[in-house]
Amino acid sequence: MTTKTVIGSVPKDLKTPKRGISNAIIDELSEEINNMLSFAIFNGITINTDVNALIQNSTVDNLIHAHNLLCKNVAPATPKSIKFTKKLHLEGKNKSVLNKLPLVRNLIILAIIFLGIFIITGLSPNVNNDSLDKGIMDNHGLPLLLNLGYLASVSGLGVLFYLLKNVSTSVKKGVLLPEESIEYMAQIVLGIIAGLILAEILSLYLTDPEKINLFNKSVLALIGGFSSDAIFTILQGLIDRIKSIFIPTKS
């Protein structure tokens, strides 16, 4: 029994795909243009009138040009942040105030937790000027845990003070992004670490250890939490300078 070979027939999945922009990309481009137009109109942002003619002649080139013009009009907001803000607005219509923005809700909950730790540790007789003067080197046991918890809570309040202000500004300007919820969690950890570094390590080099008290260690922890980005930049600059001494730059 012989089998016949059909010449000229090619399976659909082996055909060469068509070149050019897919319809899905064009639909996404049109959706982003509409979102940016709606955002600009709602917020009273001046729109370049050339956009209208470009949309009417909706070729791919015109749509891309209109998209570019609108991106400049709505900046610093972006199509991604506008889409995310619109999604949050639609999903939060029938929700309570705190549940409309999960990121803000989570930050407020963390702020309340840090505030509770701050109050509880501050009321402890083990947290005082003498105990803080000893620092992490000479302290031990429960007093050490309570003192570190106190300073960590102050650092946490500092970084949350910064983040809540930043989030409120981002929501107002329409620049909030979904990835920021992950980034903010990392910033909280960095803020606590930065606060402890300033309060327990750098404070020994910034002033006389005998003069360190509850007030200025708390201020250093608060500053460390609030300005964790700046402290990271300073430390990174020091590391880069040290590396440049031992590792010559390539010409």
Image: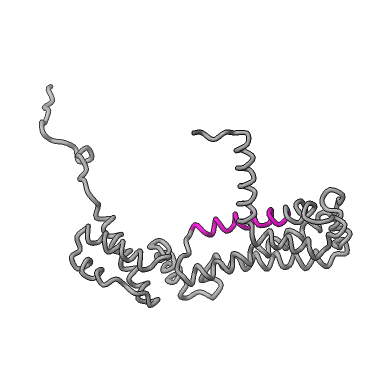
Horizontal placement of 43 versus 205: left or right?
left
Kindly identify the residue that appears in the image at 34 percent across and 72 percent down: 38
Horizontal placement of 167 versus 78: left or right?
right
Q: Residue furthest front?
A: 251
Residue 159, x across and y down, in percent: 64, 62
* Color theme of the render: one colour
Quadrant of the image occupied by residue 186: bottom right
Identify whether 31 is placed above or below 2.
below
Q: Residue furthest top?
A: 1
Query: How many numbered marks appear?
Result: 0
229 and 121: which is toward the camera? 229
61 magenta-colored: no
Quadrant assignment for the N terminus:
top left
Residue 61, x across and y down, in percent: 22, 58
195 magenta-colored: yes
Horizontal placement of 159 versus 48: left or right?
right
Residue 98, x across and y down, in percent: 56, 72
23 and 93: which is toward the camera? 23
Identify whether 226 is placed above or below 48.
above
Kindly identify the residue that appears in the image at 77 percent across and 68 percent down: 119
Kindly identify the residue that appears in the image at 54 percent across and 59 percent down: 181
Quadrant of the image occupied by residue 67: bottom left
Kindly identify the residue that appears in the image at 42 percent across and 65 percent down: 77
Residue 95, x across and y down, in percent: 50, 74
* Principal secondary structure, stretch drawn in magenta: helix
Quadrant of the image occupied by residue 70: bottom left
Magenta segment, which residues? 179-196
